[in-house]
Image: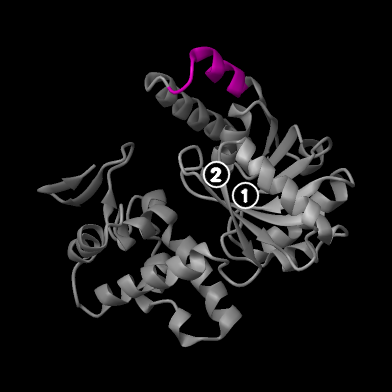
Amino acid sequence: MKNISVIGSGTMGNGIAHIFAQHNYQVSLIDINQSALDKALVTIERNLDRMVAKEKISVNEKIATLANISTFTQIENGVRNAHLIVEAATENKELKFDIFKQMDTHAPIDCVLASNTSSISITALAAQTNRPDKVIGMHFMNPVPVMKLVEIINGYNTSKSVTDTIEQLSKDIGKIPAMANDYPGFIANRILMPMINEAIWTLHEGVGDVSNIDSVMKLGMAHPMGPLQLADFIGLDVCLAILNVLYEGFGNPKYAPCPLLVNMVNAGKKGIKTGEGFYSWSHGTKELIVSDSFRIK
């Protein structure tokens, strides 16, 4: 596998493109919006500049990484020569179904189709194609260039050879693969999202405020960031979408999203991406503003 196509140029898509290009794969980054692609390239270059400044890569490696990325606004053009396609579009089932149909139509017959989905069934995605044995989940973590984990999800029909290939590929790009089977939320979000949801319920019921809830989990449980800060980082709309998948998939009330989360998403307060969630985020920086007198960097 040398030709990698990535569909979606948002936070996850540009990170996936970055890490493959940095490891000398030829990457086709695809998005329907050229301005989104231009923004993604700026983000990738900025992240590479940080790596150069920290002496993790050389200037020549930065230049080579950027040269490995081409952009496309049409799926059929961007996947024509792909050995692997990683879909990294918004966490919306119908959108992903449509993309997988297009991927299957336009990609070479031996191309592997992967999804970066956080929770949507790989088996259901595979059912949109004529190659269910070549469909698999590659759930990268944010920020992709930094986080080591790739959760690899086998659909019902995923072949062992495809699983073995993707497992080795993940190692080749410096990641550590963890294998999961296709059940709602897989491993990562089946465990993580109920914790975040419970933290939101704890806030909703007045047990503690945002700062104290996060402090208990950071200082008492050794979590690197609190669950409410993490929810802002993930995106409250993404958290809500995943919880809905868990609730629908298991039919268990313990997965029902807290009404506070639903209201915040409906109000457009989705976390870092909108500048406000459980915290207010100062624009253009990574500084988290809890109050006028307390700042966490």
Query: Mark 2 to mark 1: distance in Å?
Result: 8 Å
Q: Which mark is residue 10?
A: 2
Q: Describe the element under mark 1 as helix, strand or loop.
A: loop
The percent coordinates of residue 228 (x first, y second) are 31, 62
Q: Is residue 160 above or below residue 22?
A: below
Q: What residue type is labelled 2?
A: Gly
The percent coordinates of residue 191 (x first, y second) are 46, 69
Residue at horizontal 80 percent and vertical 58 percent from the top = 159
The percent coordinates of residue 219 (x first, y second) are 20, 58
Query: Which image quarter: residue 216?
Result: bottom left
The percent coordinates of residue 161 (x first, y second) are 80, 52
Q: Describe the element under mark 2 as helix, strand or loop.
A: loop
Along the polypeptide, which appears first: circle 2 or circle 1?
Answer: 2
Q: Is residue 71 above or below residue 189?
A: above
Query: Which image quarter: residue 96?
Result: bottom right
Q: Does the magenta stretch include residue 63?
A: yes
Q: Residue 88 carries which label?
A: 1
Residue 153 visible from this viewpoint = yes
